Image: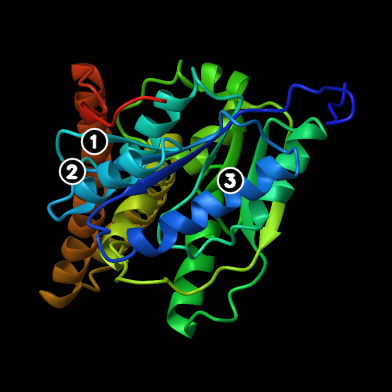
Amino acid sequence: MEKTIDEARDVACLYLVIPCYNEEQVLPVTAPRFLEKIKEMEGRGLISGESRILFIDDGSSDSTWSIVTALNSRDHRFQGIRQSRNRGHQNAVLAGLMEARSKADIVISVDCDGQDDFDAMDAMVDKYYDGYDVVYGVRSSRESDTFFKRFTAESFYRILNALGAETIYNHADYRLTSKRVLNAFADFHEVNLYLRGLFPLVGFPSTTVEYERHERMAGSSHYPLAKMLSLAFNGITSLSIKPIRLITGLGAFVSLVSFIGVIWVICKVASGDTVSGWASTACILCFVSGVQLLSLGVIGEYVGKIYMESKHRPRYIISDRTSGDE
């Protein structure tokens, strides 16, 4: 049954979950913009006056936490939690979601750099009132990206889907989720997190909202190519066993080729048409050895993840919180 603002006077309480890591340059610029958006949505009756902006300091080494506490002292709508050490973007987002789920009706996770269009939040909340529990922010285009960035990003999503990790094309971590989705999501206890692939697994009605992505308002990106590749590999191995199956298929193919090669050698020996040489032998050995090492590496990655999951270590540890509501 669809929900509308006209049917229910009790509008939703919204929390913005904003992960931060060494963002002392951009935070003073974007924080007022987030507050302005919250006030605007309150004025339109989209969200309640209990809505908040929750910053998650992911163990920053600069003055990010000092800025968050200063914002909180000036306006109680700004709240913050601080992790005991840097644990990565995905764990920081998770910490914010779990912190907000008991306080908010809906949560929007968004980066603090100002690249994600703030106005898309209005459309996300509208979709929530239309009956959707998950609203994914999806980039409308990548025309502003360089060729290399666009090629790698598009390849990233295609490879993930091809290897069995269900993802929303051109979606990062800009999304709205309802309380019941977060309550269900709390039952997922993976240590190796890939949130973009986990939310589709939770289910519930979902839709997308397109938006234009802008340049950073200040500072520089903390997500270089190496971290993007690590995130992609983590997403594949955390959500799919298809690479293991590909290894099995490759092993069967190599075995078949080797069996044919053995038959060919036997025929050559029987006919007396043999020539001693090291080149063919070396090529075969290098090929088979390479396949074996690659296969062992992928299997080892899965074994390592099983090892980490078996320890049941906490995914985040909150060391500090700002003061509560006035």
Q: Marks 2 and 1, how far apart in space?
A: 7 Å
Q: Which quadrant does the C terminus fall into?
A: top left
Q: Is residue 293 left or right of residue 128?
A: left
Residue ID for mark 2: 59
| Residue depicted at x 42% and y 54% | 31
Q: What element does badge 1 sit on? A: strand
Q: Which mark, residue 82?
A: 1
Tell me where residue 244 sits by quadrant. top left
Tell me where residue 148 sits by quadrant. bottom left
Q: Which mark, residue 38?
A: 3
For mark 3, does the 10 Å Cα neighbourhood hold few (<14), some (14 to 19), or many (20 or more) residues?
many
In this view, the residue farthest toward the bottom is 147
Q: Marks 3 and 2, how far apart in space?
A: 26 Å
| Residue depicted at x 48% and y 49% | 110
- Front position among marks 3 and 2: 3
Check disc 2 and give the amino acid type.
Answer: Gly
Q: Earlier in the sequence, mark 2 or mark 1?
A: 2
Q: What element does badge 3 sit on? A: helix
Check disc 3 and give the amino acid type.
Answer: Ile
Is 94 rendered above or below residue 59?
above
